[in-house]
Amino acid sequence: MISHLIGYLAAILTTASFVPQAIKTIRTRNTQGISLIMYIMFSTGVLFWFIYGIVIKDIPVIVANAVTLCFAAIILVYKILYR
Amino acid sequence: MISHLIGYLAAILTTASFVPQAIKTIRTRNTQGISLIMYIMFSTGVLFWFIYGIVIKDIPVIVANAVTLCFAAIILVYKILYR
């Protein structure tokens, strides 16, 4: 179904988008332009999505948010360490 | 239901998290630490979530992603203009 294809494409893009940011942040340690509040809110939100996935027993929601949480948490830790 | 509460909290946090980043980027114009690839992928992904919401006729998905798209697009435009 076309709607599933759009949904999967959306999930892959939004999840994978944090990979280039994490790589850039690890390489450059330049976190000046990155918002600490954003990554605190975002990481907490993704953690809630992950818990939500467990509660509603939805594997794609669990997996996508587990992956996003890893990369968002890396960026958050770098932001705290190198601000 | 507790699962709805967790879902709404997750949606509000991940959507609203881009507001402090957009404000910071508009104020400082410092986009050096921000990944261009991330915001291209993320904005495209959120656009697909928005289209997905229209296809499956889900108002929360449409609204949350319309809001996120606005702020992500602002950050993307600033990244392109002030890199």
Image (tube, coloured by chain):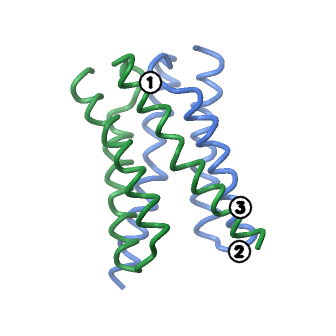
Chain colours: A blue, B green
Tell me what residue is drawn at x 51 percent, y 17 percent.
A29
Instruction: Check the image and report above or below for B53 versus B18.
Output: below
What residue is disc 3 on? B6
Measure how far apart labels 2 and 3 are at the Cα level: 10 Å
Given the image, what chain letter belongs to the residue carrying mark 3?
B
Q: Which numbered dot is residue A56?
A: 2
Instruction: Check the image and report above or below for B28 versus B58.
Output: above
Which of the two discs, 3 and 1, labels the residue nearer the N terminus?
3
The quarter of the rendered structure image containing the N terminus of chain B is: bottom right
User: Closer to the observer: label 2 or label 3?
Assistant: 3
Q: Amino acid at mark 2?
A: Ile
Query: In the rendered structure, are the residues bearing label 3 and label 1 in contact, judged by CB atoms less than 8 Å apart?
Result: no
The answer to which image quadrant residue B29 occupies is top left
Q: Amino acid at mark 1?
A: Lys
Tell me what residue is drawn at x 65 percent, y 73 percent.
A58
Q: Position of residue A66 (x, y in %)?
A: 64, 54
Measure how far apart labels 3 and 1 are at the Cα level: 28 Å
Given the image, what chain letter belongs to the residue carrying mark 2?
A
Q: Position of residue B76 (x, y in %)?
A: 30, 36
**Along the viewing direction, whichever of B83 and B6 lies nearer the viewer:** B6
Q: Which numbered dot is residue B24?
A: 1
The answer to which image quadrant residue B23 occupies is top left
Q: Position of residue A51 (x, y in %)?
A: 73, 60
Q: Amino acid at mark 3?
A: Ile
